[in-house]
Image: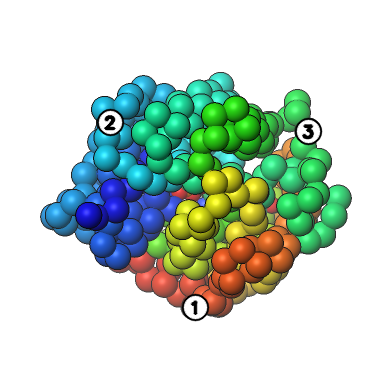
Amino acid sequence: MKNRVAVVGGAGFLGSHLCNHLSKHGSDVLCIDNLHTGRASNLNLLYSKDGFELLEKDVRELNKVDLEGISQIYNLACPASPPKYQDDPFYTLDVCYTGTLKLLDLAQKTGSTLLHASTSEVYGDPKTHPQAESYLGNVNTVGPRACYDEGKRISETLCYEHFQKFGTRSRIVRIFNTYGPRMDPHDGRVISNFIRQSLSGKPHTIYGTGKQTRSFCYVADMILGLEKIMNLPDNFVLPTNLGTEMEYSVNQLSEVIADICGVAQETVYSELPQNDPKLRKPDLVRAQKLIAWSPEVTLRDGLRLMINDFKEN
Ligand code: NAD
Ligand code: UDP
């Protein structure tokens, strides 16, 4: 019998790549999304495929019937870019709490396994570098990023407590900055902003000094990591970082994007948003032990693919 998988938040950037990958490799895929930040057009390659279905619904309103026959659930439902998750902080908090709890309850009732998409943001503005899973984080609970950071932290706790009390099978993955085709050019994240700006003859908007760093992982690498963690035999997988160790400052990123787009690098600097993490790079030892996985796509190669996608669309 075919594996039937639900991807909640599947019409978003990461979710649509995951739906494509799973469908291509033989699973039936039920994409569940309320199109809050996702786009139905992200799934255009899939509508004609046998075994693919889009259920337009809020994760918080799902019921057992919706997930009938599902053996694996990926929970990606949550706005991910800072401007989007800060737009309605109560929504962000509630999707993280009520949405994750709802999926855990349904996973328990249907005997399926939940993979929860957590984030490097649980480390806040970190005081250790790189960030290993053992680092407990430095999150300001009363700042503009808290609705997302704390929302994601409580989602992790829900997975843990559900496993403790009911034995619900789950995995927690802490995703570090991931980019690629089909990112929303207007979602406000740094790579989509810089590419859109370069392609429309505008300067890159750099926040702060631009010396803050991120480690940017190409989406295809991330999807393989997520699938491998989902398929581990363990009942509960402790939080595991996925991302790349290739670390760039925002200034360096701006330079590389301008270069690949074939334009002169122009920049305009403005204030750094409150609590913006200064350094970010994953420690990948746990991931390597668990799934023998390392990202392969270089920043330049990944950016070329994304820039072509932005040009075409
Ligand atoms: P995205 O905004 O493109 O995707 C999120 C999807 O969730 C969208 O399709 C949106 O419509 C859907 N959604 C939101 N609220 C929902 C609800 N109530 N019910 C059903 N669907 C809902 O963002 P993304 O970059 O694809 O991120 C996907 C997940 O991965 C998020 O949970 C995010 O926190 C996590 N993550 C992403 C990154 C990254 O760099 N892309 C990094 C860390 C964590
Ligand atoms: N950033 C920037 N210009 C932009 C958008 C973002 O300089 O137009 C900076 C932002 O302040 C942060 C980094 O780029 O330091 C990554 O931002 P993004 O929103 O992509 O992700 P996150 O902060 O959640 O890692």
Q: Residue at x 38, y 56 (%)?
A: 18
Q: Is residue 109 visible?
A: yes
Mark with earlier residue (1, 3): 3
Element type at mark 1? helix
| Residue 63 horizontal side relative to residue 234, left or right | left
**Residue 206 at x, y = what percent?**
66, 55
* Of labels 3 and 2, the one closer to you: 2
- The quarter of the rendered structure image containing the N terminus is bottom left
Label 2: which secondary element: helix
Q: Are marks 2 and 1 in contact (CB under 8 Å)?
A: no
Q: Residues within 10 Å of mark 1 (few under 14, many from 20)?
A: few
Residue with the mark numbered 1: 301
Q: Which mark is residue 66?
A: 2
**From the viewer's perspective, is 181 left or right of 301?**
left
- Whether ligand 1 has any atom under 8 Å from the Cβ at mark 2 is answered as no
Name the spot of residue 33 as percent of width and height, x first.
34, 37
The residue located at (54%, 29%) in the rendering is: 166
**Foreground of the two, 287 or 164:** 164
Corner quadrant of residue 250: bottom right
Nearest the eye: 45 or 234: 234
Circle 3 sits on which residue? Answer: 140
Q: Going 18% across and 51% down the picture, which residue do you hit?
A: 51
* Residue contact between numbered discs 1 and 3, judged by CB atoms under 8 Å: no
Q: Gap in Å between the C-alphas at discs 2 and 1?
A: 39 Å
Q: Amino acid at mark 3?
A: Asn
Q: Measured along the vertical axis of the image, is residue 40 above or below residue 209?
A: above
Residue at image location 60% in from the left, 27% down from the top: 165
Near-viewer residue (212 or 127) = 127
Q: Earlier in the sequence, mark 3 or mark 2?
A: 2
